[in-house]
Image (cartoon, rainbow, N blue to C red):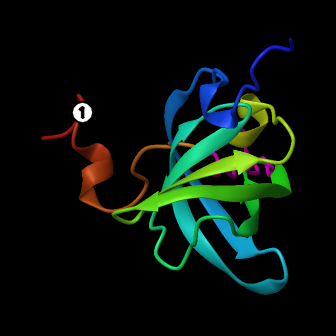
Amino acid sequence: MGEPAIHESQTPRKPRQQVLLGAEICGFGGGAPTKHRIKDLSASGARIDRADGLKPGATVLVSVGVLKAVGATVIWVKDDVAGLRFAETIDPDAARSKAIIAPAAPRPATVVNRGVTAGWIKDLNSPYRR
């Protein structure tokens, strides 16, 4: 006799990390992307909030960090929170990284302090002042 089939709910899931990341999600067929926050993240899935409009079983594209248009399936939705399973495993570090490196802040102009050169103030500390 063969071994009993293991259902997806019985397979151990990857360890999740608590994060707070901004993500954009759009339907697989297109449509305007919606903004969400990722609360938990693993290599195989994520828990997001602001999930109104998502339905269990829907296929979506997730963009977060340097990851763009990662395929995912909505597994569950409850109280404006949803669980996603990625079609392929991702690198959680890539999801947490930024794609664009901000340019260095411009250096302030160098100010040369020559002291006061006008009026009576220039002589304020003069030992020869009366």
Q: Is residue 68 left or right of residue 129?
A: right
The residue located at (57%, 72%) in the rendering is 55
Residue 49 in the image: above or below residue 110: below
Residue 66 in the image: above or below residue 36: above
The C terminus sits in image quarter: top left
Q: Which of 92 and 110 is in front in this view?
A: 92
- Bounds of the magenta segment: 96-110
**x, y percentage for residue 58?**
70, 69
Q: Is residue 52 left or right of residue 73?
A: left
Q: Name the residue under label 1.
A: 128
Residue 86 in the image: above or below residue 33: above
Q: Is residue 70 left or right of residue 73?
A: right
Which of the 4 image quadrants contains residue 29? bottom right
The residue located at (63%, 51%) in the rendering is 84
In this view of the protein, can residue 104 be seen by the observer? no
Q: Does the magenta stretch include residue 102?
A: yes
Q: Which of 124 and 33 is in front in this view?
A: 33
The residue located at (73%, 50%) in the rendering is 102
**x, y percentage for residue 48?**
51, 54
Q: Does the magenta stretch include residue 118?
A: no
| Label 1 crowd bin: few (<14), some (14–19), many (20+), radius 10 Å | few
Q: Looking at this rendering, what residue extends furthest in the bottom direction? A: 31
In this view of the protein, can residue 26 be seen by the observer? yes
The amino acid marked with disc number 1 is Tyr
**x, y percentage for residue 89?**
83, 35
